[in-house]
């Protein structure tokens, strides 16, 4: 059971340039752990990365951390990075950088797919849904 079709309209590991973000979010969906994204999205938390099996990670970068050595290669516009370890799963594009709006776009699709299948879980995702709505109501993609 996966959420690739419901959330993202499919998954082509050998051609999707956004395969890494789809893969990571699908893993969270399958484990019913989307709530972990709250810590990554909410700027009041200190969480910079979440990871899981098989070998994926979602990373968040605050502007104040751009000068740290681990982030010097990030594009100036990027606030999120999704990566899948090529030793664990073969993707043509195992890494993608996203700005806040792009990241929220994928998270919103994941949440909608999860709630369509499990509407009884809405309460567990209230804070995540609120963060998504907050970003939309501000008229720009920033959370």
Image (spheres, grey):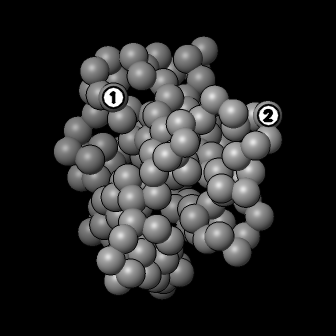
Horizontal placement of 84 versus 29: left or right?
right
Going by the image, does 98 lie left or right of 44?
Answer: left
Examine the rendered structure and indicate whether residue 125 appears above or below residue 60.
Answer: below
Q: Which mark is residue 128?
A: none
| Residue under the point 33% across and 49% down | 3
Q: Is residue 121 visible?
A: no
Label 1 neighbour load within 10 Å: few <14, some 14-19, many 20+: some
Q: How far across and how far down the image is residue 108, in percent?
A: 35, 64
Residue at 59% from the left image edge and 23% from the top image edge: 85
Rendered image quadrant of residue 133:
bottom left
Which quadrant of the view contains residue 104? Answer: bottom left
Element under disc 2: helix
Horizontal and vertical percent for residue 33? Answer: 56, 60
Numbered label tally: 2
| Residue highlighted by disc 1 | 17
Location of mark 2 (residue): 69
119 up-or-down from 85: above or below: below
Q: Is residue 81 visible?
A: yes
Chain-order first, disc 2 or disc 1:
1
Q: Determine the residue positioned at 39% across, 59% down.
A: 101
CA gap between label 2 and label 1 equals 26 Å
**118 w.r.t. 28: above or below:** below
**SS assignment at label 1:** loop
Q: Position of residue 4 (x, y in %)?
A: 30, 43
Which residue is nearer to you in this view: 102 or 130?
A: 102
Closer-to-camera residue (3/95):
95
């Amino acid at each position: 059971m996966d959420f690739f079709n419901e959330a993202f309209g499919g998954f082509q590991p050998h051609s999707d340039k956004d395969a890494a973000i789809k893969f990571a979010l699908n893993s969270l969906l399958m484990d019913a752990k989307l709530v972990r994204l709250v810590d990554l999205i909410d700027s009041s938390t200190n969480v910079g990365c979440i990871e899981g099996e098989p070998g994926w990670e979602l990373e968040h970068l605050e502007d104040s951390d751009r000068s740290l050595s681990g982030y010097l290669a990030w594009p100036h516009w990027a606030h999120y990075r999704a990566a899948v370890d090529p030793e664990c799963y073969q993707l043509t594009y195992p890494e993608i950088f996203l700005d806040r709006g792009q990241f929220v776009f994928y998270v919103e699709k994941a949440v909608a797919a999860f709630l369509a299948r499990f509407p009884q879980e809405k309460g567990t995702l209230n804070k995540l849904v609120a963060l998504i709505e907050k970003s939309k109501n501000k008229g720009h993609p920033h959370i």
